[in-house]
Image: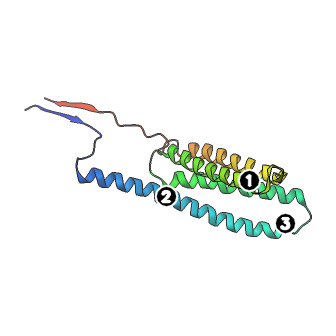
Amino acid sequence: MAVVGVVTNKPAKGRKVFYFRVMKIVKWILGTLLSYAIAVGLLVLIMDAEESLSKTKNLQLFNFVHGFDIVLVFTAVTILNCLFVPRPKKYAALLSTIIILIIAFFEMYSNVAKNGIYSISYKFIITYMCLFAGLCIGTFASSLIFKNKGWNQQPLKSEVIDYY
């Protein structure tokens, strides 16, 4: 008796495929929202501690702590987004980077439109440089953490199995 079959990576047709795709989209949305909620909570805790430091006269220490906080929070956003979102993880890192850059662009634009070009200060520039550094560090760390855990989703290769 000869059995000839093809093993594929395609799921069953019909409702199962629809529910699978819908659940994947829901996981992407909820994972992204959860990562941003955790990052905002972390930012609130850090900024509350940073407020007590702003009352000191040491401006260099305050700028260092402020920059480190921003780098830490935006690194955490990218890593948490890659942690909570299903595969491929590199698109989760790209999504969090795009969302943060869009928000930063609109915030920068509104600040310049409201106060003029001369409102850009040293702290303003350092804040956005730290934001960009945090995104780069987060993307690099995510690629190292999730390298063999879904960073690139490789399609399964179909094999022909012949039994004679």
Query: Under tag 3, what secondary structure?
Result: loop
Q: In the image, what residue occupies the spot 62% across and 61% down? A: 39
Kindly identify which residue carries mark 3: 54
Numbered disc 2: secondary structure: helix
Q: CA distance from mark 1 to mark 2?
A: 34 Å
The residue beneath circle 1 is 113
What's the CA distance linking mark 3 and mark 1?
27 Å
CB under 8 Å between callouts 3 and 1?
A: no
Q: Earlier in the sequence, mark 3 or mark 1?
A: 3
Q: Is residue 45 or residue 129 the one in the foreground?
A: 129
Determine contact: label 2, label 3, CB under 8 Å: no
Type of amino acid under label 2: Gly
Residue pictured at 54% horizontal, 54% vertical: 81
Crowding at dot 3, Cα within 10 Å, few <14 / some 14-19 / many 20+, comes out as some
Which mark sits nearer the N-terminus, 1 or 2? 2
Residue at 57% of width from left, 64% of height from top? 37
Q: Quadrant of residue 157 in the image?
A: top left
160 to the left or right of 54: left
The amino acid at mark 3 is: Ser
Q: Residues within 10 Å of mark 1 (few under 14, many from 20)?
A: few
Residue identifier under label 2: 31
**Distance (Cα) linking label 2 and label 3:** 34 Å
Crowd band around label 2 with a 10 angstrom C-alpha radius: few (<14), some (14–19), many (20+): many
Q: State the image coordinates of residue 132 (x, y, percent, origin top left).
A: 69, 46
Residue 93 position, x and y percent, is: 55, 47
Q: How many marks?
A: 3
Mark 3 or mark 2, which is nearer the start of the sequence?
A: 2
For discs 3 and 1, the disc positioned in front in the rendered view: 1
Callout 1: helix, strand or loop? Answer: helix
| 1 or 2: mark nearer the eye | 1
Label 1 amino acid?
Answer: Ala
Q: Position of residue 150 (x, y in %)?
A: 47, 44
